[in-house]
Amino acid sequence: MVIESLFYFSLAVLQALEDGLKKADADPSVKAVMICGENGKFSAGADIRGFSAPQSHPGIGLAPIVSLIESSEKPVVAAIEGVALGGGLEVALGCHYRVAHVKARMGLPEVTIGLLPGAEGTQRLPRLIGVPAALDMITTGKHIPATEALKLGLVDEIAEENTIEAAIRLANKVIGQPLAPRRLSLKPVPTLPNMEAFLREALVKVKKQARGCLAPELCVQAVRAASERPFAEGLRRERELFRLLLSSGQARALQYAFFAERAVRRWATPAGASWSSANAQPVRSAAVIGLGTMGRGIVTSLVKANIPVVALEQDLENLKKGRKAVMLLLEREAMKMEGGAQRLDFHNPARLQFTVDFDLLRDVDLVIEAVFENMALKKEIFHKLSKICKPGALLCTNTSALNINEIASATSRPQQVIGTHFFSPAHVMRLLEIIYGSHTSPSAIATAMQLAKALNKIGVVVGNCFGFVGNRMMFPYVQQAVFLLEEGSRPEAVDEVLEDFGFKIGPFRMSDLAGLDVGWRSRQGQGLTGPSLPAGTPARQRHGQRYSPLPDLLCEHGRFGQKTGHGWYLYEKAGGRTATPDPWLHNFLARYRDTHGIKARAIDQEEILERCLFALINEGFAILAEGIASGPEHLDVIYINGYGWPRHRGGPMFYASTVGLPRVLAKLEQYSEVHPDVPGLRPNAFLRKLVAVGSPPLQEWMSYVSWQSPKL
Ligand SMILES: C[C@H](O)[C@H](C)C(=O)SCCNC(=O)CCNC(=O)[C@H](O)C(C)(C)COP(=O)([O-])OP(=O)([O-])OC[C@H]1O[C@@H](n2cnc3c(N)ncnc32)[C@H](O)[C@@H]1OP(=O)([O-])[O-]
């Protein structure tokens, strides 16, 4: 008998499964049962949308179905195609046998949405594949290919062709064989000589990586229960931990992030361009100009995505250095992939070639410029590209802040100029900030979004302003952090607060990693420091607003961060990675405060967190009000995937909604009164408006913005 399920479980599907099983068990002509999915997809698990109403959630009702499958007196075989994830894999674990298509993937990704497998998976999986392998799958949520599943014993057979036929063959073969040995709930968990030590170490490792996220830790506790308790008691522990997570704010934040990352695909611009009507152009070949850190990562991303690349540098010396670095990156990437070297084939000139000759860019579909952040140089390059590249070629710039319109003005085809802001390391970071200029065509936007998908990145479409979205919100965040140093704090104190919040690295470690000279060059370019600063400008004021020269002063002392061995911290050597608090800096801060008559004060953790985060969030409201981004989800996806915002807090705007907009507003007003010359603390009018209308839920915020993108 065949019972078909749905891609992700609804209550109706569970009912159909239960009815089908009972009917099969009651029908003497039925000798075996096979469970398969529809349209070549087994199941993606429970419907995540349902978690907001836990009591009626299919995930809760799935466990009894899994037990019903396992207790069937007739062999039940799972035919796994496409994916078997979460509850889908737990259903397969209740089956007595499992056949998977060679291209199928399996996993228990509940941890990625703030939960743990809630249909007895934490108790069955360790019994089938052992604690180490089960713990790795459950605490990471990773998908494993069928070949690995076979090696682990997660599946009994792999089918190259028709999985359903293979499953039916197996079902017929096992009719009449004893089922007790196939019931995982009756199997003991395979022992380990050092189980206690293994579980303790696993917990320490998971807690360190989770940086405050609860679910991975509770996953370890559920698997520990499997190793220590009888099956029924382990189930009770699983249910207890599942309900604890289900009601947690972290689960809501992670589920919000899951859907936000899908919502940003449905982009729109205030001018009316939209994902639903724009047509992407094919990108069958690409070029990258500039083989610095970013260019190397971008080339590597394109090769990994199977897009033939021409990598261009300005001269042979830089080309040789860039080529060497790219080949090293690709060799490392190839080692991570099964058959990587063959698949990437990057020694093949048809796949990857290096040149100093612009003429080789004549026929590519898309060019990504990744040279120095210097407007004159970028305009010179775009002017040249505009003359050389074929008419339909897309001309992209990897600038992280500069005006797209000005760059486009150097070409005769501004409709094909677009910002594609990659994040370092470009072959690792998933975010691609896509910035349209005033003349950028809808097709160019759609093509850039298609490129993001091809590179396995998350594209977010944003408008053109200084710093776009990510860096524009990052500026007030870092600015507040530096002001806090002037007022009495230290880099390690500020970083500790933000890292305890969940950031991988705080603002000062981040600045040392990126290089203080990057911002310094930008501020020199803006005339905020250096020789172009008008004589008589007050040291701590620019354009009538508070300004901290601290980062400039560090750069003038040659302290660029890790690359010079000292910046906000001291490192073991130039290029060192180990940051230690630097007595020189502490003395320097004390001297600086004396010079400017600043009396140091003790600054508590709450003020540090709020001054940094609420200034960032406040800029987010300005961005939404100006129509630079289509919605709060876009800002949250950018921060989670490009700036290390802790995923289990949902993103800055989601976090603001959980703190409560009235509190964010009140604290900004309080800090703004103390620091009236810091514009970033003055509450944005849109934030005020939302509070005034009763702080509606985040999904409704954009209905209160005066500009409106067309209904998607
Ligand atoms: C009891 C049990 O223990 C527990 C409690 C559970 O079982 S909890 C649930 C555990 N399962 C998961 O965590 C799997 C989550 N899904 C995925 O990982 C991926 O979807 C995918 C399966 C690998 C396919 O990737 P894709 O890239 O091909 O398509 P997509 O764009 O991602 O998804 C296509 C569309 O389907 C929607 N979607 C996908 N999975 C969904 C799910 N489980 N629930 C609701 N919607 C889902 C998604 O929002 C998108 O909608 P829209 O944006 O088009 O409107």
Image: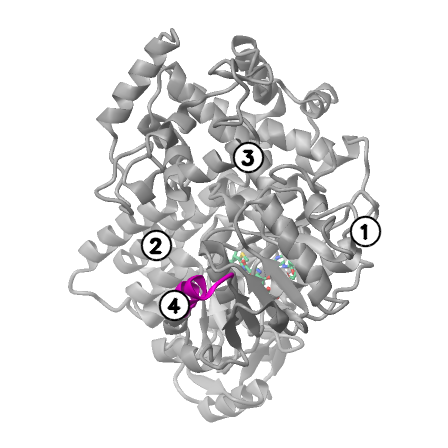
Q: Main secondary structure of the magenta part?
A: helix
State the separation of the CA atoms marked 2 and 1.
Answer: 56 Å
Q: Answer yes or no: do the residues labelled 3 and 2 have beta carbons within 8 Å?
A: no
Q: Going from the N terminus, do you reach mark 3 or mark 4 first?
A: 4
Q: Which residue is mark 1?
A: 273
Q: Which mark is residue 196?
A: none
Instruction: Tally the marks.
Output: 4
Q: Going from the N terminus, do you reach mark 1 or mark 4 first?
A: 1
Q: Which residue is mark 3?
A: 525
Q: Nearer the viewer, mark 3 or mark 4?
A: 3
State the separation of the CA atoms marked 1 and 4.
Answer: 41 Å
Q: Nearer the viewer, mark 2 or mark 1?
A: 1
Q: Secondary structure at mark 4?
A: helix
Q: Going from the N terminus, do you reach mark 2 or mark 1 first?
A: 2
Amino acid at the residue labelled 1: Ala
Amino acid at the residue labelled 2: Glu
Report ligand 1 position as a quadrant: bottom right
Q: Answer yes or no: do the residues labelled 4 and 2 have beta carbons within 8 Å?
A: no
Q: Secondary structure at mark 3?
A: helix
Determine the residue located farthest toward the left in the rendered image.
193
Tell me the quadrant of the picture where the N terminus can be found. Answer: bottom right
Q: Going from the N terminus, do you reach mark 3 or mark 1 first?
A: 1
Q: Which residue is mark 4?
A: 324
Q: Which mark is residue 233?
A: 2
> Would you say 660 lies left or right of 701 here?
left
Q: Position of residue 498 (x, y in %)?
A: 41, 32
Amino acid at the residue labelled 4: Lys
Disc 2 residue crowd, few under 14, some 14–19, many 20+, Cα 10 Å:
some
What is the span of residues highlighted in magenta in the rendered image? 314-329
Q: Position of residue 353 (x, y in %)?
A: 51, 75
